Image (cartoon, rainbow, N blue to C red):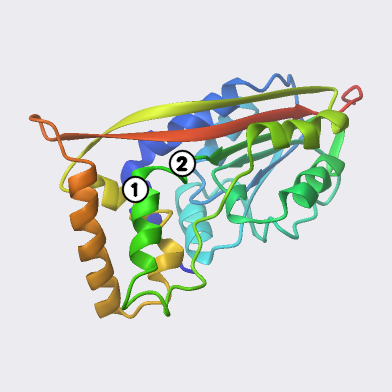
Amino acid sequence: MAWNPDQYLQFASQRLRPARDLLGAIFLERPRHITDLGCGPGNVTALLHARWPEAALVGVDRDPAMLARARQDYPALEWRQGDAATWVPDGPQDLIFSNAALHWLGGHDRLFPRLMDCLAPGGVLAVQMPANFQAPSHALIRALAARPPWADLLAGAAMGAVAEVEDYYRLLAPLSGHLELWTSEYWQALEGANPVLGWLQGTTLVPYLAPLDPAGRQAFLGALGDELARAYPPDGAGVTLYPFRRLFLVAYKPGTPA
């Protein structure tokens, strides 16, 4: 599936806020090796660099378009193409940071322990993932994709998933010296014509639009846009409130940093 950095960055400030909140919950003084796993267009990686400018920092993403944008906007930083599902670092990491990426991957019961194994003693795994899959917006996408004429074409499309908070606690607590888990719901004030559709085009809809030809995409977006406009009407000032729930975890590996 192909990502569009311009579409993704249309709501850059709203998408950055959860990353800033996750960054603010990390207590590391001088990490030496940091990976931003699923770095996208690089704007979150730039925040990591601003906080720890002396660290060896690498942004990793599997999408060529996102990496091209990251290299264009932040040429001084290091970028590598790689898949988080199979990624292996050059050496132990003091911080593995992942913002809005790991929900696309299955097998969290294997992935998260493997990432903990990639940490140096006292290192941190910091992750934020959308947990909004039961929202009306996402339910409308699934319902439309299951109807003719879309059902056959979109049978394999999926929007990712996360487990329950309790599942991540049971998985990571035995591997952590300290573990923090929480959820937050962001009430995003979006402007413009049918902004929830625009928001979803930047992320959730990518695997649903990829199998369709241009005419099919236009038809799918038109049908979905009508339903989203009814589900999320703007107020009198033209602002659409779009609540979005997110899951956060910060896991500290036992041991003392070098």
Task: State the residue in front, 79 or 159.
Answer: 159
Left or right relative to 148: residue 56:
right
| Residue 37 in view, yes or no | yes
Q: Secondary structure at mark 2?
A: loop
Q: Earlier in the sequence, mark 1 or mark 2?
A: 2
The residue beneath circle 2 is 132
Where does the C terminus fall, quadrant-wise?
top right
Give the percent coordinates (x, y) of residue 197: 27, 52
Which of the 4 quarters of the picture holds residue 135? Answer: top left
How dense is the environment of label 1, judged by Cα within 10 Å: few (below 14), some, or many (20 and up)?
A: many
Which of the 4 quarters of the picture holds residue 32? Answer: top right
Q: Is residue 24 above or below residue 43?
A: above
Left or right relative to 134: residue 75:
right
Give the percent coordinates (x, y) of residue 237: 9, 29
The residue beneath circle 1 is 137
Q: Is residue 225 above or below residue 235?
A: below
Please, what is the three-letter code of the amino acid marked with disc 2? Asn
| In the image, farthest residue toward the left | 236
Left or right relative to 53: residue 256:
right
> Residue visible at 51% across and 62% down?
158
Q: Is residue 185 above or below residue 128?
A: above
- Asked if the residues shown at circle 1 and circle 2 are in contact, with their CB atoms under 8 angstroms apart, the answer is yes
Task: State the residue in front, 228 or 91.
Answer: 228
| Residue 121 in view, yes or no | no
Task: State the residue in front, 112 or 5.
Answer: 112
